[in-house]
Amino acid sequence: MGLLDKLDLTKQIEEKSKYKKKLEELQLELLHLQPRLRQTKRNLILVFEGPDAAGKGGIIKRTLERLDPRTVRVYSIVKPTAQEYANHYMRRFWIKLPSYGEIAVFDRSWYGRVLVERVEGFASKPEWKRAYDEINQFEKNLVDDGSILMKFFVHITKEEQLARFKKRAADPYKRWKINEEDWRNREKWNQHNEAAEDMFAKCSPAHAPWTLVEGNFKWYARLKVLRAVVKQLEKEIGKA
C-alpha cells in the first residue's frame, strides 16, 4: 500500500464559520511574515502537484490573496514551448526562481519530468530515471542558498475528480478549466499514482520533503497548506 492509499480523504471542516475564521487568522499571520522574509537573504518557493481538479488553484488563491502582490509570482506550468524543448528541461525553472525576499509559487513544476512526462512517454525511461538525482541536486542547491522550499501534493479520489469534472463541464464560468486531455488522463489514473509514489520515495529528503494534502474537502486542504506555510516560515525566519 502506497502513501496515497493511506491518506484519509474524509478529513473536513464541517462549519463554514469555523473555516472562514481560521482562514482569515492564517492569512493575517502570513501577511505579517511577508515583510520579515523581505528583510532576509532568503526566499519562499511553493510547489504544487496532484491530479487534475484536486483543488491546487483554490489553495494557491487562498494562500496568496491577502499578501502584497509586488513580491509574489505564480507560475502555471504547461507544456514546454519549442524553444524550451531545445534546452535542458530545468532551464525554464531556473529563470523563474524568486529573488531574495520574494515568493514564487509553481502550479506544477520540474516534477513533470517524473510524473506526466514519464506516464505519457514525453521523456524516455533513461531521461526520467536520471531526473530524480537531477531534481534532488537542484533542490539541495536552492536550500543550501537559503531558499525555503515547500512541496505539496494535493490528492483526491477518482470518484471526487469525476464529480468535479462534471460540475466544471456544466458550468459556463468554469468550462475553461477542463479539456479532452483531462479526461484522457483519467484513463491512466493508476499509472499517475505509481509515478507519484516513486517520486515520494526518491525525492523527499529531509531538507525538501513532500507534504501530502487530503483534497476531497477543499476547506480542509486550504487550511492545511496555509497552516504548514505559516509554521515553516515562523521556524525559518522567526515569528512576526
Image: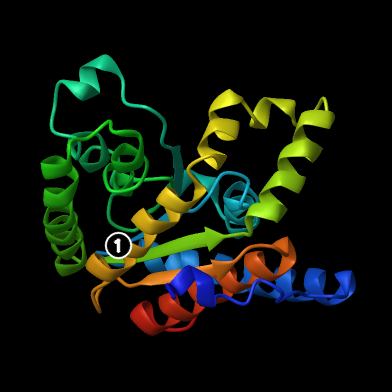
**Above-or-below relation of 228 to 129:** below
**Residue at the image position 68 percent from the left and 25 percent from the top:** 176
Q: x and y percent of residue 222 in the render?
A: 65, 64
**Residue at the image position 43 percent from the left and 50 percent from the top:** 192
Q: x and y percent of residue 139 in the render?
A: 20, 60
Residue 233 quadrant: bottom left
Residue 122 quadrant: top left
The residue indicated by pointer 1 is 198
**Above-or-below relation of 56 to 150:** above
Total marks placed: 1
Quadrant of image for the N terminus: bottom left
Q: x and y percent of residue 157 in the render?
A: 63, 59
User: In this view of the protein, can residue 39 be seen by the observer?
Assistant: no
Residue 218 quadrant: bottom right
Task: From the viewer's perspective, tell me whether residue 133 is left or right of residue 8.
Answer: left
**Residue at the image position 47 percent from the left and 53 percent from the top:** 190
Element under disc 1: helix
In front: 144, or 83?
83
Looking at the rendered structure, the kind of residue marked 1 is Asp
Judging from the image, the colouring scheme is rainbow
Density class for disc 1 (Cα within 10 Å; few <14, some 14-19, many ≥20) is some
Task: From the viewer's perspective, tell me whether residue 190 is left or right of residue 122.
Answer: right
In front: 165, or 78?
165
Q: x and y percent of residue 226 in the render?
A: 58, 69
Task: From the viewer's perspective, tell me whether residue 167 is left or right of residue 179.
Answer: right
Residue at the extreme top of the image, as rendered: 82
User: In this view of the protein, can residue 160 be seen by the observer?
Assistant: yes
